[in-house]
């Protein structure tokens, strides 16, 4: 799950009795784990480990990826309730530039990678709309 500190009506720290939502997994009889949702490599590593454990029969897990939504909750939400300094701090942790930096240090050509991604997005259509339109309707696949 993706957990962010700001919710529609109030900050999570004001409404939740616990710091990590992953702690709630215990109530359902399994383990919860927390990682930075802004660290792609941390998310990947934890996810791969937990998937392997689940496939090995060790049961379900809850992965909480802490992150931050830069914009308001909707198109009409100006997000005036945000602290400007907090927003700047989280923007400095943006996962895309962080991962680009990592790839660049590993010797990858970021400009070429971006061009490939842009080409794929343009080919497949922005967002998942093209994928969704190709899927069978839930009504046609449901037995009556």
Image (tube, rainbow, N blue to C red):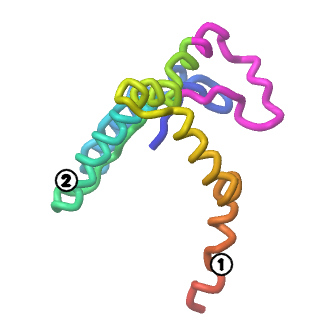
Can you identify the residue that label 2 sits on?
53
Looking at the image, is 85 positioned above or below residue 45? Answer: above
| Residue shown at the point (58%, 19%) measured from the top left | 91
Quarter assignment of residue 72? top right
Q: Residue furthest bottom?
A: 144
Crowd rating for badge 1 (residues with CA inside 10 Å; few <14, some 14–19, many 20+)? few
| Residue shown at the point (69%, 28%) measured from the top left | 71
- Residue 39 lies in magenta, yes or no? no
Crowd rating for badge 2 (residues with CA inside 10 Å; few <14, some 14–19, many 20+)? some
| Residue shown at the point (51%, 32%) measured from the top left | 110
Nearer-N-terminus badge (1/2): 2
The answer to which of 1 and 112 lies nearer the viewer is 112
Judge left or right: residue 30 versus residue 79. left
- Residue 75 lies in magenta, yes or no? yes
Which quadrant of the rendered structure holds the N terminus? Answer: top left
Can you identify the residue that label 1 sits on?
137
> Is the stretch drawn in magenta largely helix, strand or loop?
loop
Quarter assignment of residue 134? bottom right
The answer to which of 26 and 116 lies nearer the viewer is 116
Q: Which residues are magenta?
A: 68-88
Judge left or right: residue 56 versus residue 64. left
| Residue shown at the point (65%, 11%) measured from the top left | 83
Give x and y (percent) for residue 133. 69, 70
Q: CA distance from mark 1 to mark 2?
A: 33 Å
Give x and y (percent) for residue 58. 17, 56
């Amino acid at each position: 799950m993706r957990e962010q500190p700001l919710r529609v009506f109030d900050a999570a720290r004001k409404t939740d009795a616990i710091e990590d939502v992953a702690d709630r997994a215990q109530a359902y009889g399994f383990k919860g784990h927390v990682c930075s949702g802004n660290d792609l490599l941390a998310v990947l590593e934890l996810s791969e480990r937990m998937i392997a454990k689940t496939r090995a029969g060790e049961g379900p897990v809850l992965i909480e990826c802490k992150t931050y939504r830069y914009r308001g909750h909707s198109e009409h939400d100006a997000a005036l309730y945000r602290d400007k300094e907090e927003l700047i701090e989280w923007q400095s942790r943006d996962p895309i530039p962080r991962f680009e930096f990592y790839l660049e240090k590993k010797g990858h050509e970021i400009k070429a990678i971006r061009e490939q991604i842009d080409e794929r997005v343009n080919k497949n259509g922005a967002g998942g709309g093209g994928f969704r339109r190709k899927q069978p309707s839930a009504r046609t696949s449901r037995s009556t």
